Structures are given as C-alpha cells and as structure tokens.
Image (cartoon, rainbow, N blue to C red):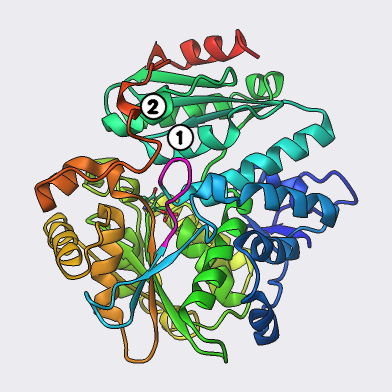
Amino acid sequence: MNYLSTRGGAFPSSGDGEACFLDILLEGLAPDGGLAMPESYPRITSEMLDAWRFLSYAELAFEVVRRFVTDIPLADLRGIVMKTYTPETFGSDDITPMTSLSAFAPGLELLHLSNGPTLAFKDLAMQLLGNLFEYALAKSGRPLNIVGATSGDTGSAAEYAMRGKRGIRVFMLSPRGRMSAFQTAQMFSLSDANIHNLAIDGVFDDCQDIVKAVSADVAFKHAHAIGTVNSINWARVVAQVVYYVRGYILATGGNDERVSFTVPSGNFGNICAGHVARMMGLPIDRLVCATNENDVLDEFFRTGVYRVRPSDETHATSSPSMDISKASNFERFVFDLVGRDPVALKTLWREVDEDGRLDLSASPLFAEVSGRYGFASGQCSHAERIAVIREVERTTGAVIDPHTAVAVKVAREHASDGVPMVVLETAQPAKFGETIREALGRDPALPAGFEDLLTRDQRFTTLAADVGAVEAYIAART
Ligand SMILES: *Cc1c(COP(=O)(O)O)cnc(C)c1O
C-alpha cells in the first residue's frame, strides 16, 4: 500500500520513491502541506464481515490494519496489534462494548470507546501508535522526542501511550491551571522518566504557538529529533476504522444490513475513520457529524460553506474536546469529494487559506456530500446537553459525558426506522464532574483504579510562554 499527499507532492521515502506506511508513520504534514492518504481503499466484503463476526477485537484490528500496512512483516504487525488491544488496557474482553439506548430513543445503540487508560476514545488509536512508534524506532535505531500541546484529552492519551517506551520522550505543554483537576492529575501523576509535563504560564493557544515554533525551527527539529502526535496522523485514523467495523458487527445480525453512526466531532478525525470504513465498503447508511456550539462542520454539512472561525469566535464549552475552529482532518474528505484530484483540492484550499472559507453551496459536489457520501449533521447547545444527560439517566440509568451527549441528542433527530443508529461514546463522565453535577446534582462515579487519582503526587515543570525557554528545557534532556 502506497500513500499520497492530498496536495499531490511526494513524502520523503526510504525506498524507491514510493511512500509506504512506515514512511508516513512518523510524519505530520507532507512537505507540500497536504495529508497522507492511501492510494486506494482496500475492500471490505460481506464474506469478510461474516467471518470477522467471530474474531476478538484485537484479531479484527489486525485484519483491518494489515490492509493498510505492507512494509511491516505480518507476524510483527500481529504482535503489535495483539499486545495493544488487551482486556488489561481496555477494561473488558469486548474492548468496545455496546449497550442499548432504546429506552431513550428507538434504535439507538451506544458503542463505548472510552474504557482505555485515560477514559477517552483517543486511547484506542494512541495505544496502537505508541507500539508502532516503538517498533519503527527500534528498527531505525533513531530516537524520537515528541513535543505537543494539550488542553486535556490528547496530551494524556499520548503520555499513557508513550510512557516507558524505549527511544521515545514526550514533552507535553499544557496551560498552567486551566485543565480540569481530573485531567491535570492524570497527566501530572505519571512518574515515568520519559514523560515531561510542562505547565506553561499562558492559555492553550500559547502552548500551541510554541509547539508550532519549535516544529518550524528546522535546525532545532533535526538536532533533537522532534516529532508530533497530532490528530492528522494517518495511523490514528486507521486504528479508528476498526471500531466502526466492530460497531457494525455488534449492531447487526449480518446479511448486508445497513447501520448509521453519529459521531461527536471536533477535528474530524473520528468521523473521517467512518468515512474511510464506508469507502472500504462497510454498509454504513448515514454518517452523522455532531458538533457543539462550535459548528464549523455542522454549518458545512447544512449549507455547503466551510468557514474557519477566528479564535475569538471559538467558544469555550462544556464539551471542551470539540472546541475547534478549523477541522484538521477535513481535507481528507474533500480530497475524495473532488475525485482525488490534488489540483482541484489545492484550488479549494487556496480559498480557505486566503479567505478563511470555502463555498461549495452552488457546486454539484455539495449534493454528493449527503447523497453519495452519506453525511448528515446536527448541533447541540449546553442546555441541550444538560437535558439529554438527565433524560438518558432517567430512561436508561446510564450516565453519559457531555461530548457523548452532543451525539446522543443529534442521533435521535436522525434515527430512522429499521436502521440501527450507533452513537460513539467518546469519554467517561468521570472526566467532566462539573457538568455531571449540573445535570444530575451529584458527582460521577470514579471508575475502578481512579479512586485515589486526585491525591497522587504530581510532577511537572512550570515554564514561561516562551519558545526559547521550552527549547532550552528540551535541549538539556535530549
Ligand atoms: C477528541 C475528542 C472528540 C473529537 O474528536 P475528533 O476526532 O477531533 O473529531 C470528541 N470527544 C472527545 C471526548 C474527545 O476527546
């Protein structure tokens, strides 16, 4: 399997000029600014789905992932996948169990993706990434120093995936005093020597600006083997395809039945994996993109206009992991939409770069977004999240987190008779105590193993919001 850039340029390649999985694994953007895409989508047939019904999650993950990876020996890849998706790491044999919400709305199912070490769905991809990175770096003999910025979920998922990994160090910047107590404790209580928590005197945007400046400092980047683990990493998308297949299998009895999915969306990474699964032939009816008050994506799916928001128009909400102003994986879908023509893609993206918007409302392509590609969308406000958390608890007894609540609310609006609607649960309520207290008047239960989290010793270094200070810290430790 070879990989292309959405903008038509080449990736640095270790072999004959073609970029394979390992060539793009550690890359962020392609040198031309595009994102990695497979040159074609491998097929999922109904025979495969019938056979895959009987596999464990890890075995299913191997079947899906191996179709995208041709440059890791299959026995090695199998070992990497099998050691990733274990009941020890993900809390149950099912890895992603499914429960019914039919008492709340007919046909709704909840696929639980947040039983990993940091209680958010990002663990499912990040844990695989950690094991793939360790393998790739051992082969090349090179180290990797990951520098990232987090407002909460991504940073902890990355740290728990990379802790104790040979050849990898993590330098994670977070805005000092601005993460929730739970998120802070999760990250700062790690004692692994390869994990460095940098509490920056500033806001999230300051952290992100510093990471961008460090990545743009080419001499520093090369001297210190700097890399990132952001949401555009292709291996993360591939790992996420697996649970769409799993959700399909759990929601159907076989025989080409169709299933719809509703996905709480921010950077379009999660739902992009649903799009890939659908392109591979998984019988997905509708892919419903659910947003909070930051509705860049909902606006596009409703109107055909994609309008990047300036940061002062980005609302801080009670579903913070979806507070984005620009959906970094969206370019992958647009690449397919324009028939995988990099020239057409670049023409559209020039509009985004210059005017901050892209207008397909008058284009025949816009009809294909919902027609051929099956997308739909909706949004959910804070008051609606509170109401849905209450109603789900009253009707089913389940407590859902505010991100999942966004999707549950939107899913009910898009449910149709006879087609199961699978809602992706992206985080556990324990991470968002304040909102759960507002909705239910009590604290969320702490999952097993987290009871003493808030009282564990914390380890972090406070630094000024200054690129030089961060580079000096990294340089002294690499
Ligand atoms: C990251 C995240 C999202 C958004 O996922 P995208 O892939 O960015 O669309 C939704 N919910 C939670 C809890 C998250 O951590």
Whether 472 is drawn above or below 192: the answer is: above
281 left or right of 417?
A: right
Secondary element under disc 2, as helix, strand or loop, is strand
- Three-letter code, disc 1: Gly
- The residue under the point 86% across, 53% down is 73
Give the quarter of the figure containing the N terminus: bottom right
336 left or right of 450?
A: right
Q: Do the residues labelled 1 and 2 touch (CB within 8 Å)?
A: yes
- The residue under the point 21% across, 74% down is 104
Q: Where is residue 93 drawn, in percent x and y? A: 54, 58
- Three-letter code, disc 2: Ser
As drawn, the label of residue 174 is 2
Foreground residue among 445 and 340: 445
284 left or right of 204?
A: right
Q: Where is residue 8 drawn, in percent x and y? A: 68, 58
Specify whether residue 113 is painted magenta. Answer: yes
Tell me the crowding category of disc 2: few under 14, some 14 to 19, or many 20 or more residues within 10 angstroms, Cα based: many
